[in-house]
Image (spheres, rainbow, N blue to C red):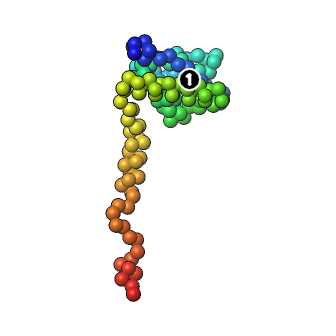
Amino acid sequence: MADSDLRKKREILFAKFPPGQVPEAADDLQRMEAVEVQPKYEKRSLGVGYDLQQHTLRELDEHLVDKGFHLDNTLLSKLTRALIYYVEDTQLHNIGAPDKRLKRSAAEGYVQAWEQHPHGDHDDTPPEWREYK
C-alpha cells in the first residue's frame, strides 16, 4: 500500500446549534500532533488531513464530541461517517497496524470498576446468621 493511500483528507461537519463551533474546534484540533486543519466557515465544517497510521476520523470525531462539540447528525452524515470508519479500520487491519489502545480515561474506568467489584468468596451475611440453626 502506498503512503499516499494512508494520507487522508476528510471533512467534519458540525450541527447548526450551537453556532460558532468551527473556529473553536479548529483551534482544538490544531493542537493535536500531525493533524492539518482548514476551517470552512460557510459549510460549518473543518477540512482535516492526517496520516491513517497516526489518527483516524473516528478518533478525531470522538475527541471533538468529548470536548463538547456537536457534529452534524443528519442521516447522510451518519452514514458517511460510518462508511469512513469502516474503510479506515479495514485499511489499518490490512496493513497489520496494531489496534489502538483504549483511551486512558476509559481504561482507568475499567480498572476502578474492577477494584470496586467484590472478589472471591464474598458473603454479606453476618457471621451470626450464617451459623444460625
Residue at position x 59%, y 21% in the image: 45
Horizontal side of residue 3 vs 79, given as left or right: left
Viewer can see residue 105: yes
Q: Quadrant of the C terminus?
A: bottom left
- The x and y percentages for residue 115 are 36, 55
Q: Quadrant of the N terminus?
A: top left
Closer to us: 17 or 113: 113
Closer to us: 114 or 99: 99
Picture quadrant where residue 70 is located = top right
In the figure, 110 relative to 76: above or below?
A: below
- The x and y percentages for residue 19 are 64, 27
Judging from the image, what secondary structure is the residue with disc 1 in? strand
- The x and y percentages for residue 47 are 53, 17
Residue at position x 40%, y 71% in the image: 124
- The x and y percentages for residue 78 are 61, 29
Query: Quick one: which residue is furthest to the left in this view?
Result: 120
Q: Callout 1: 10 Å neighbours few (<14), some, many (20+)? A: many
Residue at position x 41%, y 41% in the image: 105
Which residue is denoted by mark 1 in the rendering?
12
Residue at position x 55%, y 20% in the image: 11
Query: Quick one: which residue is furthest to the bottom in this view?
Result: 133
Viewer can see residue 18: no
Amino acid found under the numbered disc labelled 1? Ile
Picture quadrant where residue 44 is located = top right
Horizontal side of residue 66 vs 116, given as left or right: right
In the figure, 102 relative to 130: above or below?
A: above
